[in-house]
Amino acid sequence: MSMEAYALCPRPLTSRSEWQAAIDALGFDLRLGSGKIPPASSGHLPAMRKGRETGFECSVIPLSDLTETYAEIDFGGSWPCVYAFSFGAISESIGALIAIAACVKLVGGLAFYPQEGRLLTADQAVEYARDTVPAAEDLEKRLNGGAG
């Protein structure tokens, strides 16, 4: 089952190194793969976490894609850059949560999790990632028979 989440930003991220520095500053263990990031690229963004390969789909979409699909949500204005994240596996969701939190914290954006109907400020997105990642790791370990 594929899930999605979004980072609504006042500007695009300038580079992978800028995004990585934001992840590092928050103290998360996620290393973005080398190469270009959206909007210069689109699709699978490889990453490493705890020595294991992971990643997630990431692309830039127009805000109208969200406002038309989720007409009941007030997105708080016009956002010139919207990153769309798609993920399926638990390890992918952990990576995406971390990447979204760092992204919106860095640029002062908002995070949107449609499955939960949640629109979060940057600080709330960081707290959400910090609260959710350990629970997701525990679930992943249980599903993998304790290996992790």
Image: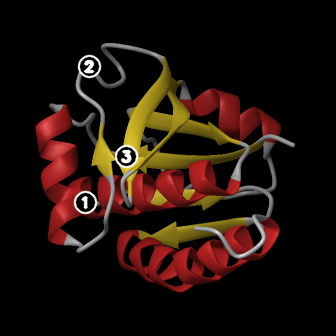
Q: In percent of the image, x 42 and y 61: which residue is there? A: 98
Q: Nearer the viewer, mark 3 or mark 1?
A: 3
State the SS at label 2.
Answer: loop
Residue 57 in the figure: left or right of residue 107: right
**On screen, 24 above or below 11?**
below
Q: Earlier in the sequence, mark 2 or mark 3?
A: 2
Residue position for label 3: 48
Give the spatial CA distance, label 1 vs label 2: 16 Å
Residue at x 37%, y 14% (from the top left corner): 41
Front-most of residues 48 and 28: 48
**Does label 3 or label 1 sit earlier along the sequence?**
1
Cα gap from disc 3 to disc 1, whole angstroms: 12 Å
Say which label, 1 or 2, has the lower sequence index: 1
Crowd class of label 3 (few under 14; some 14 to 19; many from 20; radius 10 Å): some
- Residue 53: % across, % down: 46, 41
Residue at the image position 81 percent from the left and 55 percent from the top: 72
Q: Which residue is mark 1?
A: 23
**77 is higher (above) or lower (below) than 78:** below
Front one among 120 and 24: 24
- Amino acid type of the residue that numbered disc 3 sits on in the rendered structure: Met
| Number of numbered discs | 3
27 sits left or right of 75 in the view: left
One can see residue 76 in this view = no
Percent x, y of residue 119: 60, 66
Q: Which mark is residue 36?
A: 2
Amino acid at dot 2: Lys
Q: Is label 1 in a helix, a strand or a loop? A: helix
Vertical comparison of 12 with 96: above or below: above
